[in-house]
Amino acid sequence: MLQDIRENAQSTIAKVIVGLLIVTLSLWGVDAIIGGFVGEPEVATVNGEDITEREFMRVVQMESQRRLSGMETPDPSLLNEDRIRQDVLESLIQQQVLTQDADEQGLALSKADIDALITQMPQFQVDGEFNAERFTSTVRNMGMGVQEFREALRTQYVINQIRAGIVQSGMVPNENVEQLMRIQNQTRDFRTLSIAGDAVADDVEVTEAEIEDFYEANRQAFQQPEQVDAAYITLSLGALAEGIEVSDEDLQAYYEQRSGDLAREERRAAHILIEDGDSADATMATIQERLAAGESFADLAQEFSADTVSAKDGGDLGYAGRGVYDEAFEDALFALEEGEVSEPVETSFGVHLIKLEDIRRSEVPALAEIESQLRDELARERAEDKFIEVRTRLADAAYAADDLAGPAQELGLEIRVAEGVTRNGGPAPFDHQGLVRQLFSTDVLEDSYNTELIDVGDSVSVVARVRDYREAQQLALDDVADEIRAQLVAQKTREALEARAEQLIAGLESGQSLEDLGASDDWVTNESVARSASGFELGVVQKAFSMQRPDSDGVVYAHSVSGDTATVIALDAVNDGDVAEQGAEFKQLSQFLASLEGQREYAAYQQLLRDKADVERP
């Protein structure tokens, strides 16, 4: 057992476990793993074991923070608290069910096993040796105690053993893979005939009575929504920076301070990308062995790399400075010597081997060339502290004030007005849904309070209040008649195109020619068209591949209408795709389908446990 753990800890499993553990902790919380506290109020009981209210609320808070951190502009007002509570409770129940199942199967790690696993994890090592301080600080940064981490690691490890056993056992028959490849690589031979909207224009007529009937049947669609005119104050770091003067002496000092950063270093990298999978480690080992034997990195990139674009150029990615690549990729690249190849590097895209081809450095530009840029940077730096101070004062003043005049005068800010803001928003800054939601809240709309200070962008904050409110109003028929006419013309044009296409198909199926049917154009022949083909009217290829396979000497007809064009399709032949059972595509597809089957089986297993569990909720 210990030897197995040591081997696993040196490979990708250690990172998988810590990653799963962090996700588990963020989603379910520490208490969800180690159990609640006796005597506390519970939110659910799973097979006799309680999920405590304290545990539940803690995880709700953690999940709320996680979702906020995933927003481009974090805004608590956009969180659906009820949904979060539902998701968290179901997750806690599922975690409890899995933990109990692992216990029933007798899956466990001893204290010695856990010690061995922890000491072998790269995350807790310094210079290749386990470091107790690194371990303790990392665990504390996760918001846990050491014993909590050990227990969480034990539980997650044994649960993951069940998952890995089921997922890795997924299998699919070769016949299924062959069939899918034939369909996936299938091509079709078909002819097309386009009918433009102009060809049916004489058949399209919209009367005033039809416009009126459409208006009456769809009155709700022709309303001017409720609107508000809003006064608002914007505080931005950029505006504060514009008011800060930077002296020539300060600019020179800042230039000298930044000179090291201004001399940009760029590195030319090549890489071989191997996607995660059961064979990833073996493939990477093969590549490293062949590199060590003297084979070309570029040739191996062309043979193995999953990045097919760069693989054509031997894995070449060109020159790039810092801040371009994934952090792990960048750290490895900038640690290499010219011509050196890295050890395998894991990123979200897969596992990379990276080769440093070349290094180039630019000279520090003259101050005159970048004077404007540096003045702006220095001004913004100096404005940051002031922004924080003024933002706090504005938030307090706006909360206490009955209007915006006082806070604006106190802080020297301008009051602006936006008209016609609806619940769907308006011009910036009312394109921010959190601010709009505040604006239409009861406190602001009905009780005439100011909104809270809302961060609507990077270092941009806004407080607003309603100046005028207008209820939704029905638009007059005269105001929307042209809009309705256009809708009806488009609708009738599509219907006429449909009818014309069906008429042509009926004639063709009865043995008539296009000339007999009065078609002004001839067929356009398209041979061996793949599913991913472009250059056709929208929906034509999709329709062609949905048509029934024709007899050996027959033709199948169908049509597709998109916008103001109809396309008649004559399907002549279906060509099955090639299947090479020993080829890389076949193997990759087989592995992918087996993985999907394993994941489906694991999901079904989880659902079975969940269905069998005795869950009680107060």
Image: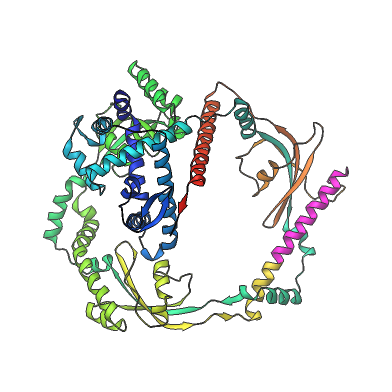
Q: Position of residue 522 (x, y in %)?
A: 78, 44
Residue 55 to residue 154: above or below: below
Residue 394 to residue 604: above or below: below
Which of the image's four quarters has the C terminus? bottom left
Q: Position of residue 64 (x, y in %)?
A: 36, 58
- Does the magenta portion include 509? yes
- Does the magenta portion include 491? yes
Tell me if 190 is positioned left or right of 449 in this view: right
Residue that appears at 24% across and 68% down: 240
Q: Position of residue 140 (x, y in %)?
A: 22, 46
| Residue 527 visible to the viewer | no
The image quadrant that residue 581 belongs to is top right
Tell me if 282 is positioned left or right of 508 in this view: left
| Residue 525 visible to the viewer | yes
Q: What is the chief secondary structure element of the magenta stretch? A: helix
| Magenta part of the chain | 489-514
Toward the viewer: 538 or 183? 183
Residue that appears at 80% across and 33% down: 551
The image quadrant that residue 383 belongs to is bottom left
Tell me if 221 is positioned left or right of 143 in this view: right
